Image (cartoon, rainbow, N blue to C red):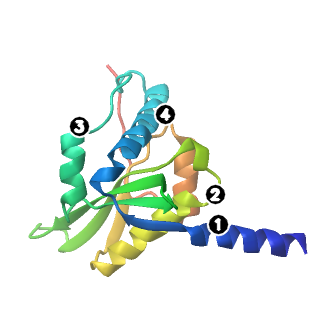
Amino acid sequence: MLNCICIIVCKAMKNNIKVRRAESGDLAVVNKLLYQVEDLHRVGRPDIFKPGEKKYTDEQLLQIFKSELTPVFVAVEGDAVLGYVFCIVQQTVGAKCIFNHKTLYIDDLCVDESARGKGVGKILYDYAIDYARSIGCHNVTLHVWEKNPGARAFYEKMGMGVQQTTMEVVL
């Protein structure tokens, strides 16, 4: 009986979380989440990521929000933004050895620290997959930092597998 209650509560919680396109009014929360991602990356790779910086300026974010080639979706519960997924629509056309195809690249997916464990990441990921299908994409890709094993485990749980590996030597 307890399991049934948990399933109903979990489903109800997910039903209260909606996904929509990011808007200019979401700028402050998206910035907060960008700093959370930056902090995580900086801890893993302090040789690459600068402290206290974020990936985009406010002006860049507003342009990204408006573009059909860079849709950003936010998960909201009531008025609260719980997370985002930044996407980039990529088109391969006319390559000699690769078929023409459209890819949805997940540039960034972040769930607010206070909302983790509620299934928000899965909701955002599933939404991005559905969106990719709706616009005729062949696949969905992303990069995950090796120093972020939690993210890698999450994406593997979602069914993603390694497409290619980037290797480095730090000089």
Label 2 SS: loop
Judge the density around disc 4: few (<14), some (14-19), many (≥20) Cα neighbours within 10 Å.
Answer: some
Please tell me whether mark 3 or mark 4 is closer to you in this view. Answer: 3
Judge the density around disc 2: few (<14), some (14-19), many (≥20) Cα neighbours within 10 Å.
Answer: some
Q: Are marks 3 and 4 in contact (CB under 8 Å)?
A: no
- Describe residue 68's horizontal placement relative to residue 49 as left or right: left
Q: Nearer the viewer, residue 125 or 155?
A: 125
Judge the density around disc 1: few (<14), some (14-19), many (≥20) Cα neighbours within 10 Å.
Answer: some
The answer to whether any part of residue 88 appears in the image is yes
Count of numbered marks: 4
Q: Position of residue 89 (x, y in %)?
A: 24, 64
**Which of the two discs, 3 and 4, labels the residue nearer the N terminus?**
4
As drawn, the label of residue 13 is 1
Residue sitting at the far right: 1
Q: Amino acid at mark 4?
A: Leu
Q: Amino acid at mark 2?
A: Lys
Q: Amino acid at mark 1?
A: Met
Please tell me whether mark 4 or mark 2 is closer to you in this view. Answer: 2
Read off the residue under disc 4: 40
The quadrant in which the N terminus is found is bottom right
The answer for how far apart the CA atoms under marks 4 and 2 are is 20 Å
The answer for how far apart the CA atoms under marks 3 and 2 are is 29 Å
Label 3 SS: loop
From this view, report whether residue 93 is shown above or below residue 86. Answer: below
Q: Are marks 1 and 2 in contact (CB under 8 Å)?
A: yes
Quadrant of residue 3 within the rendered picture: bottom right
Quadrant of residue 17 within the rendered picture: bottom right
Q: Position of residue 128 (x, y in %)?
A: 40, 67
